[in-house]
Amino acid sequence: MKPSIYITRKLPESIIAPLQKEFEVDMWEHEDVSVPRDVLLHKAESASALLTMLSDKIDRELLQRSPSLRVVANLAVGHDNIDLEAAKELGITICNTPDVLTETTADLTFALLMATARRIVEADRYVKEGKWKSWSPLLLAGLDIHHKTIGILGMGSIGEAVARRAKGFNMNVLYHNRSRKYAVEQDLGVQYATLEKLLTQSDFVVVLAPLNEDTEGMFQEEQFLLMKNTAIFINAARGPIVSEEALEQALKRGDIAGAGLDVFEAEPIDADHPLLKLHQVVALPHIGSSSKETRYGMMALCVENIHAVLKGKKPSTSL
Ligand code: GLV
Ligand code: GLV
């Protein structure tokens, strides 16, 4: 019997064709709806490999109930949806998709920063809704980006790629990270800061850290109070790093000026969520790595990694 692979979302034919020659491939039938937990548990029970989305919970229960499982390839760089410790204990290889998405995610992060500062989304709506009656001196006036200070929380590859973009805008770049990045400081001319210094001095606070026990709930009222009231907060990492309740209050009180969010505590966010009622919030549906080139690249990498592990070879990216 051929080893079987379960893919938790409908992917293009061209991506899965190479696997179908050697493996039994089964796939959830929808492109835009997550596989229900009970279906996933059932499919995983007999699978040798899973190709998963960041919205699938790959926890100890699932891993323990899947005796043939050898590899999980997650279509994301983040892996907070997977119990790595349980996987290690059970000898299951976990693969993610770093590197291929670095520049694309940095592009989106910077676009979100610019859109929030310069009120691009509001301005688009203003024109399309026929509200533009005359030119006026402070019409949709936003905030400058060039020559300002950006504070990057989480100086991994994506953080570095955002820092390079910021340098192109003549920004002063601060960063905070678990470990100092001396080489990056040298190469890019960025400066390490304590979290407190980063929050108090930055005009743009950009979160790019992974979600883990150190970062979960890191942004509360206290952190927003430290920030300038002209500051803009950007989160392109994971929603649970930030208390949305605290963020909402900070925006309403004017403790900070705006927020650009690609990620939320619960995704998809409810359209009635109070944060979405605020004009100074730009909200995106977790599309950091979503360019056609990169999403195809990520899918191909997952397929390649599954193929490698099932053939007894080393995958090119694993955790
Ligand atoms: C997306 O958020 C990812 O982790 O790749
Ligand atoms: C961003 O999503 C990261 O995992 O650093």
Image: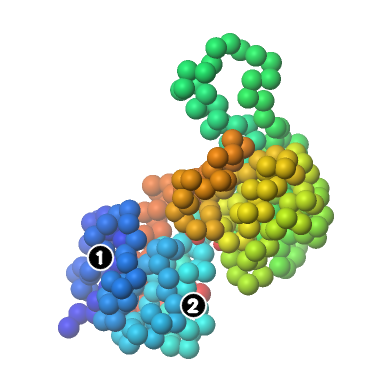
Left or right of residue 284: residue 244: right
Task: Write down which quadrant ligand 2 falls in.
Answer: bottom right
Above or below, 290 against 61 in this view is: above
- Name the image quarter holding the N terminus: bottom left
Of callouts 1 and 2, the N-terminal one: 1
* Colouring style: rainbow
The answer to which image quadrant residue 172 occupies is top right
Bin the neighbour count of mark 1 within 10 Å (Cα to Cα): few under 14, some 14-19, many 20 and up: some
Q: What element does badge 2 sit on?
A: loop
Instruction: Please tell me which residue is depicted at 73% across the width and 55% down the height of the picture.
Output: 221
Residue at label 1? 27
| Label 1 to label 2: alpha-carbon separation | 22 Å
Q: Is the CB atom of the residue marked by disc 2 within 8 angstroms of ligand 1's nearest atom?
A: no
Left or right of residue 189: residue 287: left
The answer to which image quadrant residue 214 occupies is bottom right
Above or below, 66 against 237 in this view is: below
